[in-house]
Image (cartoon, rainbow, N blue to C red):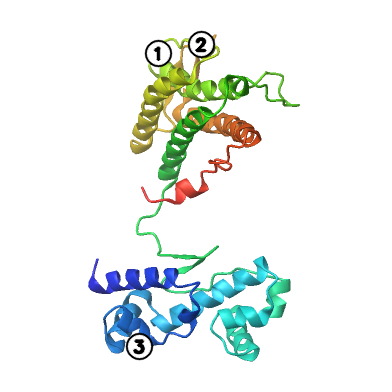
Amino acid sequence: MTTSADTFAEFVDHLAEALDDPRITEASGEDWAARLHFSRYHFDRMIKSVAGEPPSALRRRILLERAAYRMITTTAPLIDIAVEAGYGSHEAFTRAFTRVYGVPPATWRRRPGHIQIDAPSDVHFHPPGSLRLPARDKVTAMDLLTKMVEHHVWLTGEMVRLAGRLTEEQLDQRIELDVDDDAQTVRSLLSRLIGQMGMWNAAMASRDYDWSVEEHESLSSMRQRLATEGPTYLAHVRDVVASDRLDDTFVDALCEPAEVFTYGGMIAHVLTFAAHRRTLVVLAFGRHGIEDLGWGDPMTWVAQPA
């Protein structure tokens, strides 16, 4: 990265850290330049060369975006939101907000629209309280698919780990479902999550899968199996994605009669049924006071850099 790009990234980091500091709304351009050890002249030129807008304009825009977010997620009076955004009066805030959003704050609050304001830098306020530089690398559909499988393998491991906090009785407690006649337990669901990957690993290798291993499987056995089946399955996915072979087919000789599937269809099958089983597990965990995984949502995982 260039010095200007480095300085811009540092400026955004400082801005994000200071969003909840009231002094940010009072800091001058000279204050920000001094904080990053530049003269105001050189600081403004460097930020504008990278961001396409002066640092003062970027900062005002971010604060307005946050104000818009506050309007639809809180009941705070508009004057409080205006002061938080660095405006000394309701009138000044209304003029600035109307100029960029097209309607006064009170109107926008009743009928909100898109929070982000068009900007050349593509740096915006991201709720609940952060900023994010635009990604240097675009995530392709192939990358997304691989990340979802990576998340599945990781989350299954976390579920097996947390299941160690349950008693044997809790592991085997039946999960009631009106739409499913099968008797499900945390133990059976975790064993099937691992077994599903093991079953497809076996199918792709044209070998039999031992279903008996899933009969009242111990957590120790699950950990051992996942350590093999998870990386093996993920390696298959990475290889297929990297070589753009999602439409290629393979024969599943385990079926009676044997069937032909595409790799893409197989991965979609695994992720779809795994999502159902994982949700049942986290709900069961919640009943036993284990909240570590939340809903096990892949949203944050997918957004993280590789």
The quarter of the picture where residue 246 lies is top left
Q: Which part of the image, by quadrant, shows the N terminus?
A: bottom left
Task: State left or right for residue 159 relative to residue 104.
Answer: left
* Label 2 CA crowd tier, 10 Å (few <14, some 14–19, many 20+): few
> Can you tell which mark lies on residue 112?
none
Mark 1 lies on a secondary structure that is loop
- Give how far across and how far down residue 122 sits, in percent: 44, 69
Mark 1 touching mark 3, by CB under 8 A? no
Tell how many labels: 3
> Can you tell which mark lies on residue 206?
1
Q: Identify which amino acid the numbered label 2 is placed on.
A: Trp
Residue at image location 54% in from the left, 70% down from the top: 116
Mark 3 lies on a secondary structure that is helix
Examine the rendered structure and indicate whether residue 203 appears above or below residue 55: above
Circle 3 sits on which residue?
30
Query: Closer to the N terminus: mark 1 or mark 2?
Result: 1
Residue 205 in view of the camera:
yes
Query: Closer to the N terminus: mark 1 or mark 3?
Result: 3
- Give how far across and how far down residue 101 sits, in percent: 61, 78
Q: Identify which amino acid the numbered label 1 is placed on.
A: Ser
Q: CA distance from mark 2 to mark 3?
A: 69 Å
Circle 2 sits on which residue?
211
Q: CA distance from mark 1 to mark 3?
A: 69 Å
- Give how far across and how far down residue 11 sits, in percent: 36, 73
Query: Closer to the N terminus: mark 2 or mark 3?
Result: 3
Examine the rendered structure and indicate whether residue 246 appears above or below residue 141: above
